Structure formats: structure tokens, C-alpha cells
Image (cartoon, rainbow, N blue to C red):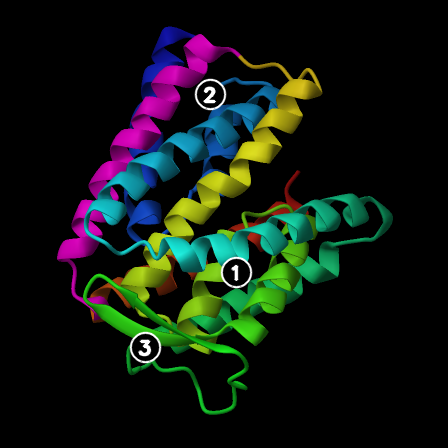
């Protein structure tokens, strides 16, 4: 990559990191195509994107954590099975066609976006969701109850599906927490922001162990841009009304659903 290409890519990455980090997403699905257009080889782009996600997640976590909107106990209760599911899904993907699965889950994301736009009571799960092994939580100014007996296996399945279709697990964990489990929007965003970085770490290590190309001197400015954008995004998020924040999240979900479908037909 030329110096000019790196500078342009940094500007684009920072601009993308702001809206994604506002709603707890790493933005990795957009970083790879940006790097490819800038002239980076695919495997190096994948490795570099994971590195950028980790730095972006760190930036978002520093802001959300300082404002006490990251429920650490909830986060670490769902991470192990979700990541294990993601590994399993990534392995199984080689044996099945995921084309239909991608289309189905693009539709699911659009449906989730629709419900995100509807008026909702913060911190209350729908009446049809079984309340098994409920865990009363308190984080910052928020108090809520989570059905852990259902949440843990559901996040494992979400991780498995995310691994199969090659997207970040936070893409499914976030709407699940908000729409099905009554997690306050700000807490769900804080949890998802940290989750995406943790989930990216084993993938990044795997790429390095597999001898994927990785140029730290190119990756560092790109990751710094992602970090800067992911620090600004949460600051804006915390100042944004919940209703408007849910609209931003809906737009991001729809954009990712469209990108998932485009990615099926454009290689």
C-alpha cells in the first residue's frame, strides 16, 4: 500500500468506526473491503481487520467502561460459550453451503431493525421469553433481570451461526440482549463493544500462527484511526437519546444485512 492509500484508508476507517462504535459494533465487515480497495492482499486485509477491531473495541470499552455501561459479569458469563460456538461454526462452515443461511439471517437482521424502531420499555423482556434462572443485575444507574438459563445457550447458538457465515458475534448478541432479554440498550451496547474485541483476539492469533501476512507498520496507523473513531463514537452515543440511538442501531443492522446479501453475489 502506498502512503497516500494508507492515509485515505485511515480517514475512511475512522469515519466508519464512529457510527459502528456508537452501537457496539466493531465494524470489521467494512474494514476488509476498504483495505482491499486500498491495495492490500485479502489474507493480510483479514488479519489487519481483526487487529483494528481489537483496538477499536479497546477504545470503545475505555469510554463505556468509564461511564459504567459495561456489565462485566454479564459479559464474561456469555463470552466462553459464544466464542466456542463461533469456533465450531467456523469449522462446520467448510462442510455446508452458507448461501441460504446468509440470506435468512440478513432477513433476521432487517426484522430486528424493524423491532428496534418500535417503542419499547427499557429493561423488560417480552412476555413470551421464558424466565429461567433469572439473574438480577445492577450496573451503574441501571437495574434489570436477565434469563441466564436461556441467554447462555442462545448466545452459544448465535456464536455458532456467526462463525458459520463469517461475521462478528456481536452482530447477533446485541439485538438478542435488547429485544429478547430486556437488557437496557446502553448496557447491551457496552457489553457488545467489549465482546467484539475479545472475540477478534483468537482469530487474530490464528491468522498469525497460520503465517498470514501482517505488516505492523501499516496496521498501526489503520488501527489508530479505528481506535480514534471508536473513542469518539461512544462519546456521541452516551450523549444521544435512547430512541435516536435505537434508530442508529436499526440503520447499522439494515446496512450490514444489505452488505451480507451483496457479499453473496459479488466476490
Instruction: Assess disc 1: are there few (<14), some (14-19) or many (≥20) residues with their C-alpha within 10 Å of its C-alpha.
Output: many
Please tell me in which quadrant of the rendered image residue 160 appears. Answer: bottom right
* N-term mark: 2 or 3: 2
Disc 3 or disc 1, which is closer to the eye?
3
* N-term mark: 2 or 1: 2
Residue 242, percent from left and from top: 22, 68
- In the drawing, what numbered circle is on residue 123? 3
> Are the residues tagged 3 and 1 within 8 Å (C-beta)?
no
User: In this view, which residue lies farthest toward the left?
Assistant: 239
Marks 3/1: CA–CA distance: 18 Å
- In the drawing, what numbered circle is on residue 38? 2
Pick whichever, 156 or 16, lies toward us. 156
Give the dominant element type of the magenta stretch: helix, strand or loop: helix
Q: What residue span does the magenta drawing correspond to?
A: 215-242
Pick whichever, 9 or 206, lies toward us. 206
Pick whichever, 67 or 49, lies toward us. 67
Residue occupying the point 53% across, 25% down: 36
Marks 2/1: CA–CA distance: 29 Å
Identify the image quadrant of the C terminus.
Answer: top right
Residue 41, percent from left and from top: 60, 19
Dot 1 corresponds to which residue?
A: 172
- In the drawing, what numbered circle is on residue 86? none
Q: Is residue 73 left or right of residue 42?
A: left
Would you place residue 87 above or below residue 172 in this image? Answer: above
Instruction: Assess disc 3: are there few (<14), some (14-19) or many (≥20) residues with their C-alpha within 10 Å of its C-alpha.
Output: some
Marks 2/3: CA–CA distance: 43 Å
Amino acid at each position: 500500500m502506498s502512503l497516500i492509500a494508507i492515509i485515505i484508508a485511515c480517514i475512511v476507517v475512522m469515519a466508519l468506526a464512529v457510527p459502528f462504535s456508537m452501537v457496539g459494533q466493531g465494524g470489521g465487515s467494512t474494514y476488509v473491503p476498504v483495505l482491499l480497495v486500498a491495495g492490500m492482499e485479502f489474507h493480510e486485509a483479514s488479519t489487519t481487520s481483526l487487529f483494528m477491531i481489537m483496538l477499536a473495541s479497546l477504545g470503545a470499552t475505555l469510554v463505556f467502561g468509564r461511564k459504567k455501561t459495561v456489565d462485566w459479569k454479564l459479559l464474561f458469563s456469555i463470552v466462553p460459550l459464544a466464542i466456542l460456538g463461533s469456533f465450531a461454526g467456523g469449522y462446520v462452515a467448510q462442510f455446508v453451503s452458507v448461501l441460504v443461511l446468509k440470506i435468512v439471517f440478513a432477513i433476521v437482521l432487517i426484522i430486528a431493525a424493524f423491532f428496534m424502531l418500535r417503542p419499547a420499555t427499557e429493561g423488560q423482556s417480552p412476555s413470551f421469553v421464558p424466565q429461567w434462572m433469572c439473574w438480577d443485575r445492577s450496573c451503574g444507574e441501571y437495574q434489570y433481570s436477565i434469563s441466564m438459563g436461556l441467554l447462555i445457550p442462545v448466545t452459544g447458538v448465535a456464536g455458532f451461526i456467526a462463525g458459520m457465515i463469517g461475521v462478528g458475534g456481536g452482530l447477533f448478541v446485541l439485538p438478542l440482549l435488547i429485544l429478547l432479554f430486556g437488557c437496557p440498550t446502553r448496557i447491551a451496547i457496552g457489553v457488545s463493544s467489549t465482546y467484539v474485541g475479545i472475540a477478534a483476539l483468537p482469530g487474530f492469533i490464528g491468522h498469525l500462527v497460520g503465517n498470514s501476512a501482517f505488516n505492523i507498520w501499516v496496521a498501526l496507523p489503520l488501527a489508530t484511526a479505528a481506535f480514534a473513531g471508536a473513542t469518539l463514537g461512544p462519546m456521541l452515543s452516551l450523549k444521544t437519546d435512547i430512541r435516536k440511538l435505537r434508530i442508529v442501531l436499526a440503520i447499522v443492522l439494515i446496512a450490514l444485512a444489505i452488505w451480507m446479501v451483496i457479499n453473496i453475489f459479488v466476490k
